[in-house]
Image (cartoon, rainbow, N blue to C red):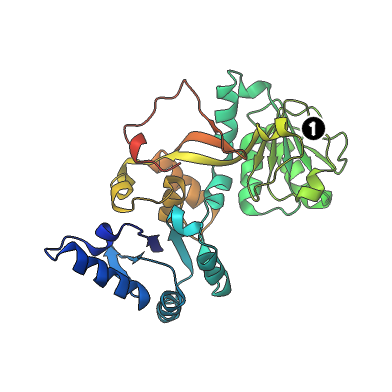
Amino acid sequence: MVYIKLEENMDKFMGISNLPKTIQKISFKSKCRNGKFKMEKIENMDYIILPQMNEKMLKKLKNIANIRCWKNICVSDNLRKEKSFMKFAKENHLKVLDGKWLFKNMVDQVVEYIVLAKEEMLVNQEISILCQQLDETILEKIKEICVKVKLCNILTNHTKQFQKLEEEIYQTNGIVLNVSNNYKRAISKSSIVINFDFSRKDIEKCVFSKNAYFINLDKNIKFDKKECNERNIIFYGIDMPEKYVEFLDTLEGFNSSILYESFIYKKTNYRNIKKELLEDDAKILYLKDCNGKIMTNPNFNLPKTLDKITI
């Protein structure tokens, strides 16, 4: 994993120096013009610190990325807002972590968090899942969630791919999984809707319960009705596991949830990821709707490291 930060504070970029301030400013501007940046090591990971965005700098980054075969990068929040950099990353096939992979792997905890925040019981909930393409993580998440709730519906255009799953859940747990392609009726009574991969166009066809909560795992989809967006969860916060807390200082300016994702992100089977999440005791700290409003659970104890967490 490669970490890249845009350090806009000249003093922090230049570090401790006995040179007069005027000389430091001239030196800083010269480095920026020439596309220079810092390259450090955090344990075995590359840490790039950029003083400014320009074409020379991006060209040098591209050369290093090609030489070192970069694939996945974790960037600071301010760098994520730089359109030129995000375009550079896309053109050079660099995956910029955005937290969505971890969001998907922790969706069962997100569901439980919402239910507890409403002071209700999970066993009384009717949950609906929107999914067109089934993969291993979605498969396992459906298995985990359906046994904890009153009713679980799946809305999809490809009902046949869920037949084996339906049979397995019924034979193993005696639970009937309601798989349907009826956009008007299948999920109309659900209290929580989990969207794995439906497009905005698909969602607009659906009929939802008036007070339903939405968990949009893939894209940050907004609804036309403002009141729906208040219950439209598009992101989350992680209580950083103890063994990674030290990185909150070292990698200041990075979103803590995306940072944690970078530490455990890998291509492996779902069981290995679940095992690691359990060992880390990873927990949801807050949820964020598409209006940017933070949803917290007053019954949860806030961590001591809250002041270091980037929301």
Q: Is residue 76 left or right of residue 183?
A: left
Q: Residue 40 in the image: state x and y as whole percent.
A: 28, 67
Give the residue displayed 36% in from the left and 76% down from the top: 33
**Picture coordinates of residue 182, whole percent (x, y):** 88, 40
Q: Is residue 127 visible?
A: no
Q: Residues within 10 Å of mark 1 (few under 14, many from 20)?
A: many
Q: Secondary structure at mark 1?
A: loop
**Is 176 on the left or on the right of 292, as rendered?**
right
Type of amino acid under label 1: Phe
**176 or 36, which is in the foreground?**
36
Q: Which residue is mark 1?
A: 208
Instruction: Indicate the quadrant containing the N terminus: top left, top right, bottom left or bottom right.
Output: bottom left
Q: Quadrant of residue 65?
A: bottom left
| Tally of numbered tags | 1
Q: Position of residue 58 (x, y in %)?
A: 45, 75
Q: Is residue 115 above or below residue 187?
A: above
Quadrant of residue 106 in the image? top right
- Residue sitting at 86 percent across and 44 percent down? 181
Q: Nearer the viewer, residue 101 or 234?
A: 234
Does any portion of residue 4 appear in the rendered image? yes
